[in-house]
Image (spheres, grey):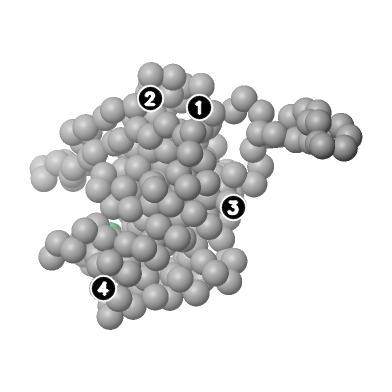
Amino acid sequence: MGKVFICDHPLIQHKLTYIRDEATKTKDFRELVDEVATLMAYEITRDIPLENIKVKTPVATADCRIISGRMLGLIPILRAGLGMVDGILKLIPAAKVGHIGLYRDPDTLQPVEYYVKLPTDVQERLLIVIDPMLATGGSANAAISVLKKRGCTQIKLMCLIAAPEGIQAVQTAHPDVDIYVAAIDDHLNDHGYIIPGLGDAGDRLFGTK
Ligand code: URA
């Protein structure tokens, strides 16, 4: 069963409060999401392996550690996932970015891929799938399946807010995927919105409504 990590650092929780507030305007919303993404990147990379190297300081040789060859890939789910990419790249500038676009088939209600563009060496990378709102889990599950179909095996999921229903759906479909969230909310309403949530993350990020 995949683990769920709640990133409860006070800075993350403080900023999330303003992200939720309906009075927060697009510019501030975008900046806050970007900042929280940077802080969450710190948590999500906590277990990446290090290797030992020696470095000559001006006065001696020091035994130091650097991140070992493990390469990262960021996979935002369009479109709200885009809002967290730059914040993560501030900490991990060498990461490659792939994109997955999904829509819901009106007849089957199943997510369908309409855009997939991934780094050529995606199978070798530790991938962070990014979707700010983990609601039913349908999109996250479909995006993770897209990656697994292409041979990817190291996948984590990063969200701002999750509903219990979404967490359960991902844990059931992809028990190998750990989930990182800033908060777990109460439930989904009849329209699939997370309650209390923050509304529509894509609309609030891009000022569309
Ligand atoms: N997507 C959103 O943007 N908000 C929700 O509450 C659920 C899904």
> Callout 3: 10 Å neighbours few (<14), some, many (20+)?
some
Q: What residue type is labelled 3?
A: Glu
Q: Name the residue under label 1.
A: 125
Mark with earlier residue (3, 2): 3
Task: Place residue 74 in its image quadrant.
Answer: top left
C-alpha distance separating marks 3 and 4: 27 Å
- The reply to whether discs 4 and 1 touch (Cβ–Cβ < 8 Å) is no
- Find residue 119 and name its label: 2
Please tell me in which quarter of the rendered image ligand 1 is found: bottom left
Q: Residue at x 25, y 67 (%)?
A: 26
- Find residue 108 and name its label: none
Q: What residue type is labelled 1?
A: Arg
Q: Name the residue under label 3.
A: 43
Q: Name the residue under label 4.
A: 25
* 93 relative position to 206: left or right: right
Badge 4 residue CB within 8 Å of ligand 1? no
Between circles 4 and 1, the one closer to the viewer is 4
> Callout 4: 10 Å neighbours few (<14), some, many (20+)?
some
For the N terminus, give its image quadrant: top right
User: Which of the two residues, 131 or 15, is positioned nearer the viewer here?
Assistant: 15
Element on which disc 1 rests:
loop
Element on which disc 2 rests:
loop
